[in-house]
Amino acid sequence: MITVDAVTKAYGDTPVLGPVSEVLADRGITSVIGPNGAGKSTLLTIAGRLAEPDSGTVHVHVDDAAGAVGLDVHRARSADVAKLVAVLRQENHFTARLTVRELVSFGRFPHSRGRLTPTDVAAVDEALGFLDLTALQGRHLDELSGGQRQRAYVAMVLAQGTRHVLLDEPLNNLDIRHAVRMMRLLRRVADELGRAVALVVHDVNFAAAWSDRIVAVRDGRVVAQGTPEEVVREDVLREVFDTPVRVHVLDGVPTAVYFR
Amino acid sequence: MAVVGVLAAVAVLCYLFLFVRGSFEFAIERRLTAVGAMVLVAFTQGVATLLFQTVTQNRVLTPSIMGFDSVYTLAQTAMVVAFGGGVLAATDGVGKVVAQTLLMVAFATFLFRWLFSGRHANLHVLLLVGVAIGMAFDSVATFGQRVLAPADYDLLSARMFGRLTAADPQVLPLAAGVCVLVGVVVVRRHARLDVLHLGRDVATNLGLDHRRELTLALVCVSVLVAMSTAVVGPLTFFGFLVAVLTHQVAGTHRHAVLLPMSFLLGVLVLVGGQFVMEHVFYATGMLTVVLEFVGGTVFLVLLLRKGTL
């Protein structure tokens, strides 16, 4: 469980977030939706400790034998947090020329500190297999298509073996086929591997179709949250996006129609 | 790597033992000093540039952009302006090298601490300030050189290019000790450097204290470059040349391979180059000039091909 407590963030004099208090559950998929500039990515990157909040704290709680342990992600040792929370930015650029397998092996660094044990190798193999990358493992990243490269990045954070996986817009630049495939994979990550996935999504309907919980953000504050049925409603979405939206239930999923 | 290692060893042996004329002992002693200085430069410049490029995630930058050379040039010029040309030879020795190294490390550490504790702390601001300060120091040094007597200026200008064969044998053991120390620190962290190479966000996600590792790497870089500059004078593009070669030859991102490779390639280029210069072209002191020319040309070609820093 990740608890975000009264977090605020401003760039210069412009407040972009908060105060926000949120709890990310230990299971399932949580989607963060909202208009451009609402602070979705800022919230996710602060929860994943890639950015420091101006005030407030983020704790990660893990149930182990000793009971519930809370770690302040911004104060605790980075190496300890890396075993509990994995976070991936939207844009990734490396100067090193890596193969898929080398990239995914980096995911084991929190455990191996650079020296891979058989357990680490098995975890890398599993992550590669899970994301259907086994055949591509020897290819260099610059030889892959956008969708394949995105899967390789996700495989790296999965190999990290953390309870929480935070992804900033993993569907960015993916076509319909790859976007659906990515969401199906993330659903399996949550269901079969028992991980908690939190992601920023631009498309309300992807969020509605695949998430257990949706958090709607506007102007740096959480304005609605709940199951897809509770959040994907005409009055809620109109307030979040400032745009008239009609919602129809298609195949049992609330679907927003906002194209005209 | 074995091949490069053997080639480097062959180059060293050739340089030491071939074409000895006159007293064997006299020649060996002089050549040992020169090889010592070249090995030192190969290590400091090669490793420092590699580290610097890793932490800046940039294959074009070199640590001399931080203004080390300018601090050295300014210090030398200031001494000549104040005390006359004779002072350069009169003060040579361990003390001067230590003082110059400390001055440059202090300069770099001050710059890092100031910039990384600031509000808009990031590497690009650091580089920009480094370049700006370097240019300011250069301008002051140029002004100092304008007002010198021609004879003093002549003595000074000999120090403004690297001089490999004229290094002071007294300072080599000290420099070697520093190199071994930094080498141990860096090699022990090779896996962390691999992760650092992926950039701030990914490194943080993988559990690295990014700011700490970055600062440590930059301090190592400043110690190495300062040491090298104090012993043999400024070399702007040699480290760059070696780093480019290293990435080409090694074909891996792993620092466990890259670091020793850059050292061996540096030795090969320097000692091999010096051997060829001395015995084929009979131009003993010209190697650094040639290296800077070749390095500078490679730099420009890469920059133009890439189109951006």
Image (tube, coloured by chain):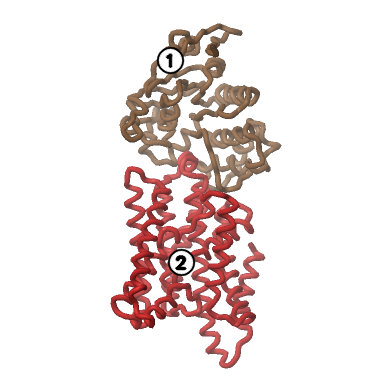
| Residue B62: image location, x then y, percent | 48, 58
Is B84 left, or right, of B66 in this rendering? left
The residue drawn where x is 37% and y is 28% is A16
The single residue placed furthest to the left in the displayed view is: B82
What residue sits right under mark 2 in the picture? B179
Neighbor class of circle 2 (other Cα within 10 Å; few <14, some 14-19, many 20+) is many
Whole-Å distance between the Cαs marked 2 and 1? 62 Å
Q: Chain B is drawn in which colour?
A: red
The residue nearer to you, when weighing B264 against B103, is: B103
Q: Which of marks 2 and 1 is in front?
A: 1
The residue nearer to you, when weighing A161 against B217, is: B217
Kind of residue at badge 2: Cys
Is B247 left, or right, of B109 in this rendering? right
The N terminus of chain A lies in quadrant: top left
Q: Mark 1 lies on which chain?
A: A
Q: Total label count?
A: 2
